[in-house]
Structure formats: C-alpha cells, structure tokens
Amino acid sequence: MATDHKTLQPLEFYKTFLDRKSRPDGRSLLEFRKVTVNAGSIGTADGSAIVKCGNTTVICGIKAEIAVPGMDEPAKGFIIPNVTLPPLCSSKIKSGPPGEAAQTATQFIAELVANNIILDLHTLCIHSSKWAWVLHCDLVCINLDGSLLDACVIALITALKNVTLPTVTYDEELDKLICDSDQKRPLEGIKQPVTSTFSLFENGILISDPTSEEEQLAAGLTSITVESTLVTHMYKPGGCTLDEKQVKKLIQQSELKAKEIVRLIEEVCLSSIAER
Amino acid sequence: METEQKSIRALKCEQSVLSRADGSVMFSQGNTVVMASVYGPLEAKIQKELSDRMYVEVNYKPKIGMPGVAERGKEKLVKTTCNHIILTNLHPRTAVCITIQEMQDGGTLLSASINAVCLALLDSGLPLQCLVAAVTCLVDKKDKIVLDPCIRTVKEGYKAMFTFAFDSQKYNLILSHCEGQVPYTLFQEAMELCQKASHIIFDFYRQAVLRKFSKELL
C-alpha cells in the first residue's frame, strides 16, 4: 500500500513525512548524513581521497605535471578540476559527452579554485614565467544519491592535503629543472571550505543534505560554502524563493556542519601521514 | 564602510527587435549589452518532453569563441530561474527556447542576462508567476560595497562579487551566485543593498511595458 502511494504520488507520500518533521530515512529535517573519508588509497596518483556522504561516493585523484605558466599570470600554477559522472553512478545519467550536471559541478569547483578559495595558486609556481605545477584533479562519482557538490569539495580538499610533490629547483645558469624524487613535500596553505546542500519546499520547509529522490521532489536547491567564519559561496540556481531569515538559518547550519567536516579531514590527514 | 555607488547604471531596452521570435529584447545596463530571444511554446523533442510541464531550454552564446563549461554554468542558473518564474504547468509537453547573446561585456553579464530574459519573456506573452530582477555588487579590497560595478572596477580586483536575483512579489531571493569570501555581516549587507536596487529594475520593467503599449495603441 505504501509503495503504491510512493510510486503514484511521490510528493504526497513525501509530504506525510515532512508534516511530522521527519524523512523516510529517519533523519530530522536539518540533519546531515554520515560522512566517511579515506585518503591516499590510490597508489598511482600523487594524491587521492574517497568520500562517502551517505550513499553518494566520490573519488578524487590528483596527478601533477609541470608546465609553462600563462602569460597573463606568470607567477601562478594551475589546478584543473574535472567532475565525471559515469553512467554507473545513477540511472538518470546516460553514456556520452558530459551532461549538464557534470559540467555545472566542474564549473562550480573551477570557480572555487579561480577565486583562491582552495589554495593560493602562487604556491604552485616553481619559477615565475618559466615553470609551474599543474594539478589535474579528477573527481569521479561512483554513486550519486544527492549532495554531489558537498562530496566533491570534501574529496578535493582531502586529496590536495594528501598530495606530495617532488622538490624541484630551477637552475638559472643552466636553464634546467632539477627534480629530486626522493625528497617529497606536501602542499602548503590549503584552505578548508565546506559545502552544504539544502533542498527547499514551497511552504517554507528546508531540509539539509537531500538524497537524489528528495532533490527531484524539491522546489529549489541551494549549496552554501563556508570557510571558518567566512561565507564563501551561496549557490542558489533559481527555484523557490528564500527570505532573509531562512538564508541566515541555512548559513548557521552550514557553519555547524563545516566544523565537523574540518575536524574529520584533519583526523584523516594525520592518520594517513602516520601511515607513510 | 561606505557605499561608493548608491544606484545602478543606466538601463535601456528595446523590445521586439527580432521579427521571427515570439519575444526578444536588446538590453543594456551601463556598458553591458545583451540580446535575448524567446521562442515558445514550441513542439518539444521526444527525449525532452515532460508530461506535466513545459521544458525550458537556455542557450548562452559568448561574443567570441565556442560556448564552454563556464557558459553551461550560466545557462543552468538562468534555466532554473526561468523554471520558477514561468507557469510551466499551463503548457505541458511543449518547450520554450531562450537564447542569450552577449553583445558587449561591461562587467555584469549574469545579471544583465537574467534581466534581459525577463524582459524578453514579458515581450513574448508567456504566462509568468512573477518577474525577476538581478543585481550584481562587488566588495573591493578595502571592504567597500560597490553596486553594479563596471568592468574597470572588476578588473582592479575584489574580495568578493555577488549576483542576487529577487522576485517581484515579496522581493525574496530567487538566485544567488558568489565569487570570493566575506564575513556574514558583509554578505547580509550586500544582499540588502541589492534587494533595494531591484526595485529600480522592477520600475524600469513597468516603464518599458507602458512605453511599448502606448506606442502600439497610437
């Protein structure tokens, strides 16, 4: 009976839970799913991380290479993110060129990088206007169950903290790069932004960390990125409207989640350094 | 903390510029010029057809080069805004195709695109739930909030740049897009300033429609 109701009228079925301030998986409205993080599992990559937010699983692998910096920014290195949603992650994804979801997620991460929110790109420069590091960050989602951006950001930050680069020095007289593969050092100055996604419903109900079913039923979606006490990005692509009080409440919830996630990432990174 | 510019740049528009489109507009906000066209309701392709509402498709064309991932990002923002303001339930199994052409980049392309699309939708006569007005503001390196920055201010560098879009009924937030980081108090102040500025844009829409119909009746 309940499954019939769920198939025929998914929104009505869902609203019976919302009226009792709960959700089908037993969470309260503003509760986040359990987050599991693992760093350094991919041996061939320079840095890697696997993140699970509930069922949503994202793997991040980072490969470094050396290139000539751009002419307009000679003292900056590059971080090139790429979010891939292969068809195995969800029944809604078809094979073929990257769809809208993958491209908008890539653009979201690229904007965070471009605004120096993840890392100051000047630290990736080896020698101004001659050589700089390029970090190719591939984020692959292997199970899509809502809150893709949250998992991607956590995976990227953890993988960057896991990266170790060989020490490279530039000899000006010989015009050569000298690479010492035995002396590896981690990246410095990685900031810790944390994204929290919320779903909005018409009668002012806000729920946090939606599953993909909840995302489809919602009238709007917003992803708020915070870093310590700074509001970094409020990504709200249209949808149902929000007033000031609701915006403030969502930002407060994001700050609470950010504290938890930052603590988790630090624990994971310390244990992975200990293993090395 | 003072606001350098308490108002937005001059708004100009000319509606029905394209003869074949259902709705079109050439819109300028200061030096930023954008052209938007609306074709709809059209017959939808079978893969895109939705049984209970109209499918909204947005194409953003940059002035130079092929559309890339950045353009997809803008398209998604405009598409989800349009999904909210157009009464899509009235035209099921059809599609509406909205095209935005960048003519000149004077600094605030995203907000100019959203405003142009709103005017083009008004011109096309599609049923709308409410109107939308988008405003961009910038927090420069000295913590001063500049409303509707021109391209020179943007190129000088900034701490953060926000684009907010509000609806015409309760002036609540429909769309938000940010670049950069600020403490929450500055964020809230920027949002309030943009909300006040959106009233100017709504007045402008009203003037534009009045002008259009007074010309037609003559």
Image (spheres, coloured by chain):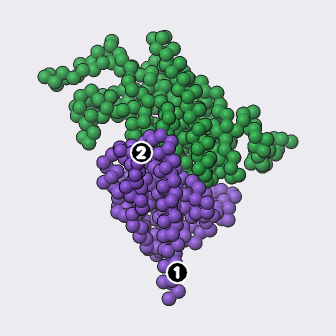
The colour with which the image depicts chain A is green
Q: Residue furthest right?
A: A1
Q: Amino acid at mark 2?
A: Ala
Q: Residue at x 35, y 16 (%)?
A: A184
Q: Residue furthest left?
A: A173
Visible in this render: residue A246?
A: yes
Q: Residue at x 27, y 18 (%)?
A: A179
Q: In the figure, is residue B42 to the left or right of B62?
A: right
Which mark, by number, is residue B213?
1
* Vertical relation: A145 (above or below) B126: above
Q: Earlier in the sequence, mark 2 or mark 1?
A: 2
Of the pair A8 and A205, the residue shown nearer to us: A205
Label the purple chain with its letter.
B
The residue singled out by tag 2 in the image is B160
Residue B37 picture location, percent across and down: 48, 66
Q: Quadrant of residue A7?
A: top right
Chain ID at mark 2: B
Chain ID at mark 1: B
